[in-house]
């Protein structure tokens, strides 16, 4: 391991010691209990098995065989989750073959950020993560299970399922993906149509045709946003069957991988291999996930989600840890929006297995961590295939399948990872530099203040933004309105940048896992609604964003800056943020949520 990464890991261990030890003590206490069907009262057990076939009742009660919980995020609104419809039947069938049982313990909500982008529903999106975690807890609270299979893929769903699973850290747990959709219209062409629409050069009919050609079938969207970053990180943490992430839902091997998840979980349970998820996800595994995110230029959303996930396991990380780790982690992948390739092309070129192998060999990932695979993390450097009805895993070639998409650690796209911390008199924020042209790493310009994304879009439509400027979009943090993604701002800002204007955005909101080529200082903390300095900026103030050295400052003399008062959210906007599309139900979360850097956690 690189000494610098070991030092970061030891720093995380030290600051996490009290909370991690307390967490592990709780896990150990739960592990000492009798299995559920032997421990619960007879009426409790009768309720748990009432709807099961007679043979399954005998397995659980008399034969004391394992009973698996299925927690599913299935719905047929999300293209990525539609394939899960029949997974419980497959899982039950495989469990029965192995003299075990499986029950759908519960379902969790799963919303599509693609549908709610720019709409009021997006204000529920971030909070849906903790809602999913709580829903997972409700499912597992029946407490009659020996292990769990978590079925989920997309943006907030995997983080929510993982947070929920870690609060049941005594259970062995495996995550079961379903794969990406096949390649449709390429992402670059899709983005060009969006930019033309923003300029009024094409109409709604042409735009809808483009979007429908890009998003056209079952599976995850094919760009490397939050959903597919989830899958990369699950591989890096050893919580998938090795190589499961990016196999198409209808490819022949997909069902066999799902069945292998059942076999692997039962193997862990029956052999008592001491792999409950709470012990498997330790500080080194969290660092491995962070390294994989940085090495692939993954979603900025995970600078929020993985802080929360780590906290669920008693581990404390912050953006300084990501920033320092990025200095020692090479950028090995170029996938849209950081490049032209989609995840299917990434998979063909080597995919997660190639990246994990290179990071291990470069001393950037810990290979000796526990995984759900018996062979450890090195098994995740191999590619699965199906032969004679069985899965075999083979080593990848040393050479990349396409070095415009994925590269070896000794020939990276960049010596440092694709995310960076920005510090200054405006607070702390992050920027995804892997997609930003190098000539845009430094932007200095006058601020134009917007309190909603609609205000910016309207100004663009009126032709008022044809100049150099820094858009300041405030009151978009967790406390203000749930921290929606502001992805709809990317096309108009891209149009302005393509015209040669120097533009950037500074916001206490999010810019989505697909944040692209616009310099974007996002997740600014503290947020405006927590009296963050962003609330002191005035129209015309000069803002300087320097991604080379990692700074973000407003260039106002100290006395003037000190004397300025914070702007407050208008009564109209506060009222709008609190009502309709279910927003009333999330008032408690807005009130109690921690900052973005603290994971936007609502349960502490």
Image (spheres, helix red, strand yellow):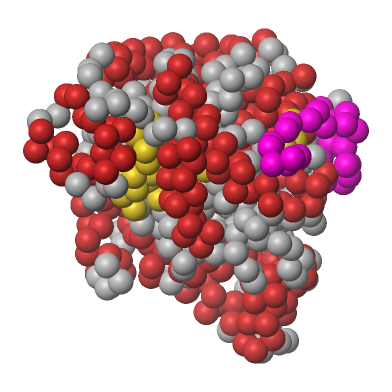
Residue at point 41% right, 27% down?
A: 172
Residue at point 17% right, 24% down?
A: 39
Image quarter for residue 185? bottom right
Residue nearest the viewer, comparing 444 with 418: 418
Residue at point 54% right, 75% down?
A: 457
Residue nearest the viewer, comparing 214 with 459: 214
The total number of labels drawn is 0
In the displayed structure image, the side of residue 419 where residue 567 appears, left or right: left
**Residue 551 visible in the snapshot:** no
Residue nearest the viewer, comparing 446 with 329: 329
Q: Which residues are magenta?
A: 386-409
**Residue 247 visible in the snapshot:** yes
Magenta residues: mostly which secondary structure? loop
- Does the magenta run of residues contain 442? no
Q: Which percent across, then down, holds residue 523? A: 48, 47
Q: Which percent across, then down, holds residue 500? A: 78, 66
State whether residue 313 is above or below residue 451: above
In the displayed structure image, the side of residue 110 where residue 260 appears, left or right: right
- Does the magenta run of residues contain 405? yes
Q: Which percent across, then down, holds residue 388? A: 74, 40
The C terminus lies in quadrant: top left
Residue at point 29% right, 25% down?
A: 64
The N terminus lies in quadrant: top right
Q: Which percent across, then down, holds residue 485? A: 49, 59
State whether residue 130 is above or below residue 570: above
In the displayed structure image, the side of residue 599 where residue 412 appears, left or right: right
């Amino acid at each position: 391991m690189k000494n610098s990464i070991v030092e970061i890991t030891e720093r995380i261990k030290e600051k996490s010691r009290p909370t991690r030890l307390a967490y592990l003590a709780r896990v150990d206490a739960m592990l000492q209990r009798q299995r559920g069907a032997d421990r619960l009262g007879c009426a409790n057990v009768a309720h748990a098995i009432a709807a099961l076939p007679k043979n399954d009742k005998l397995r659980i009660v008399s034969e004391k065989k394992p009973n698996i919980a299925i927690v599913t995020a299935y719905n047929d609104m999300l293209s990525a989750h539609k394939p899960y419809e029949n997974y419980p039947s497959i899982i039950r069938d495989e469990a029965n073959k192995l003299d075990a049982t499986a029950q759908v313990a519960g379902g969790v909500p799963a919303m599509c950020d693609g549908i709610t982008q720019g709409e009021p529903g997006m204000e529920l999106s971030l909070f849906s993560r903790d809602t999913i975690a709580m829903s997972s807890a409700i499912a597992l609270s029946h407490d009659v299970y020996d292990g769990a299979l978590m079925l989920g893929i997309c943006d907030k769903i995997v983080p929510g399922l993982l947070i929920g699973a870690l609060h049941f850290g005594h259970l062995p747990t495996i995550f079961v993906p379903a794969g990406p959709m096949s390649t449709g219209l390429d992402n670059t062409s899709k983005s060009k149509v969006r930019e033309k629409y923003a300029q009024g050069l094409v109409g709604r009919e042409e735009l809808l045709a483009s979007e429908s050609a890009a998003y056209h079938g079952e599976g995850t969207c094919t760009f490397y946003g939050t959903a597919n970053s989830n899958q990369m990180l699950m591989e890096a943490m050893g919580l998938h069957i090795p190589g499961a992430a990016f196999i198409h839902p209808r490819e022949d091997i997909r069902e066999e991988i799902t069945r292998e998840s059942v076999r692997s979980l039962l193997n862990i349970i029956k052999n008592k291999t001491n792999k409950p998820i709470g012990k498997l996800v330790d500080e080194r595994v969290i660092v491995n996930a962070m390294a994989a995110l940085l090495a692939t230029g993954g979603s900025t959303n995970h600078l929020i989600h993985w802080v929360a996930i780590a906290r669920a396991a008693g581990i404390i990380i912050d953006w300084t840890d990501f920033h320092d780790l990025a200095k020692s982690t090479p950028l090995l992948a170029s996938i849209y929006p950081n490049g032209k390739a989609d995840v299917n092309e990434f998979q063909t070129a080597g995919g997660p297995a190639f990246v994990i192998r290179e990071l291990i060999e470069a001393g950037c990932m810990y290979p000796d961590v526990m995984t759900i695979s018996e062979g450890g993390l090195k098994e995740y450097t191999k590619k699965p295939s199906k032969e004679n009805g069985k899965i075999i895993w083979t080593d990848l070639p040393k050479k990349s399948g396409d070095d415009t998409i994925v590269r070896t650690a000794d020939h990276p796209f960049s010596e440092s990872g694709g995310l960076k911390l920005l510090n200054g008199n405006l607070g702390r924020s992050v920027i995804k530099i892997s997609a930003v042209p190098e000539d845009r790493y430094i932007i200095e310009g006058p601020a134009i203040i917007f309190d909603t994304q609609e205000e910016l879009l309207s100004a663009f439509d009126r032709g008022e933004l044809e100049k150099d400027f820094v858009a300041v979009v405030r009151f978009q943090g967790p406390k203000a309105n749930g921290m929606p993604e502001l992805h709809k701002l990317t096309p108009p800002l891209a149009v302005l940048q393509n015209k040669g204007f120097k533009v950037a955005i500074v916001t206490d909101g999010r810019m989505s896992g697909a944040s692209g080529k616009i310099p974007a200082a996002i997740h600014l903390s503290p947020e405006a609604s927590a009296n963050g300095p962003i609330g002191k900026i005035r129209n015309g103030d000069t803002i300087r964003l320097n991604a080379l050295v990692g700074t973000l400052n407003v260039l106002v003399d100290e006395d003037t800056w000190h004397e300025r008062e914070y702007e407050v959210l208008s009564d109209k906007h506060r009222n709008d943020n609190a009502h309709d599309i279910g927003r009333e139900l999330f008032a408690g979360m807005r009130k109690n949520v921690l900052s973005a850097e603290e994971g936007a956690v609502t349960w502490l």
